[in-house]
Amino acid sequence: MSERNIKFQRKFRNSRSKQSKPKKGLFLVFLLVIVLLLWFKADAIMNYFF
């Protein structure tokens, strides 16, 4: 029973890490896109007012 539990925990941890890494990557890319859009919008707004 203990060996099976250890194997299950290892598989569970591996599956969780594989699922979480792409989500973190997509989240970081999404944040990067938002920052770039805000940066260019801020530049356009500054040129419009000044």
Image: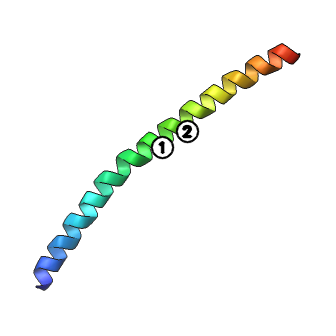
Graded by Cα atoms within 10 Å as few (under 14), some (14 to 19) or many (20 or more), the crowding at tag 1 reads few
The residue positioned 83% from the left and 14% from the top of the image is 48
At label 2, which amino acid type do we have? Leu
Furthest-right residue in this view = 50
Residue 22's place in the image compared with 2, above or below, is: above
Q: Which residue is mark 1?
A: 27
- Tag of residue 13: none
The residue positioned 17% from the left and 71% from the top of the image is 8
Marks 1/2 in contact by CB < 8 Å: the verdict is: yes
Count how many numbered circles sit on residues in the image: 2
Q: Quadrant of residue 43?
A: top right
Residue 24's place in the image compared with 10, above or below, is: above
Give SS at disc 1: helix
Tell me the distance, in whole angstroms, between the alpha carbons under discs 1 and 2: 6 Å
Q: Which residue is mark 2?
A: 31
The residue positioned 15% from the left and 72% from the top of the image is 7
At label 1, which amino acid type do we have? Phe
